[in-house]
Amino acid sequence: MKILIVDDEPANVALLEDMLGEQGYTQLKSTTDSRRVLELCDEFDPDLILLDLFMPHVDGFAVLESLRADQSEVYLPIIVLTADVNEETKRRALHRGATDFLNKPLDHIEVLLRIRNLLETRRIHQLLDNRRAALEDAVHARTAELQAVQAELEKSRARSTAE
């Protein structure tokens, strides 16, 4: 599964890339420029985003709002990375669409467990979406069949009445 890392500190990006790479995550994309997040999401189509909150140019709160506006129909887990653990920061991030939090400095085990859990949740959402789409297609096909049969019955009834 694909993970996008967004942090203005290159050392944090490298740490996360190394940590995830050691666990077999190979589809990683990262940026230190928060202005590129939407563009990278369009190109890379991540399954999970690790997002620092406090960055220059565009802060993580604004990125969250943009992502949620752009990805409103899709379950895309976003884990916020922050050293600021006060309740107001958490509320603001959750209100704007954060799925979970990781406090800096990062605990390797916690990072990997939260990522694994949210990627599994993402996979289940995708399976459900695919199943829903297949069921909708089946309903449309069956409805078309029933409408065709109904039209044939009406034609037959009209012929019988005319005779």
Image: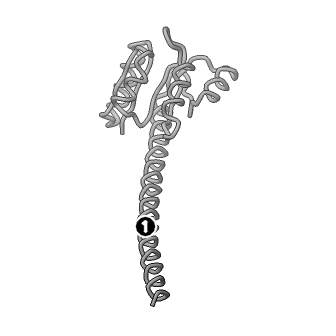
Compared with residue 80, is residue 9 higher up or lower down, i.e. above or below? above
Residue 88 rendering spot, x and y as whole percentages: 69, 21
Residue 12 rendering spot, x and y as whole percentages: 42, 17
**Residue that lies at the very extreme toward the left in this rendered image:** 26
Tell me which residue sits at (53%, 36%) in the image: 72
**Label 1 CA crowd tier, 10 Å (few <14, some 14–19, many 20+):** few
Tell me which residue sits at (32%, 37%) in the image: 24
Residue 94 rendering spot, x and y as whole percentages: 62, 29
**Residue that lies at the very extreme toward the bottom in this rendered image:** 163
Compared with residue 142, is residue 109 higher up or lower down, i.e. above or below? above
Q: Secondary structure at mark 1?
A: helix
Residue for badge 1: 144
Q: Is residue 41 left or right of residue 110?
A: left
Residue type indicated by callout 1: Ala
Give the quadrant of residue 97. Answer: top right
Compared with residue 147, is residue 100 higher up or lower down, i.e. above or below? above
Q: How many marks on residues?
A: 1
The C terminus lies in quadrant: bottom left
Tell me which residue sits at (42%, 53%) in the image: 130
Q: Nearer the viewer, residue 151 or 18?
A: 151
Q: How is the image coloured?
A: one colour
Q: Nearer the viewer, residue 72 or 138?
A: 138
Q: Nearer the viewer, residue 157 or 34?
A: 157
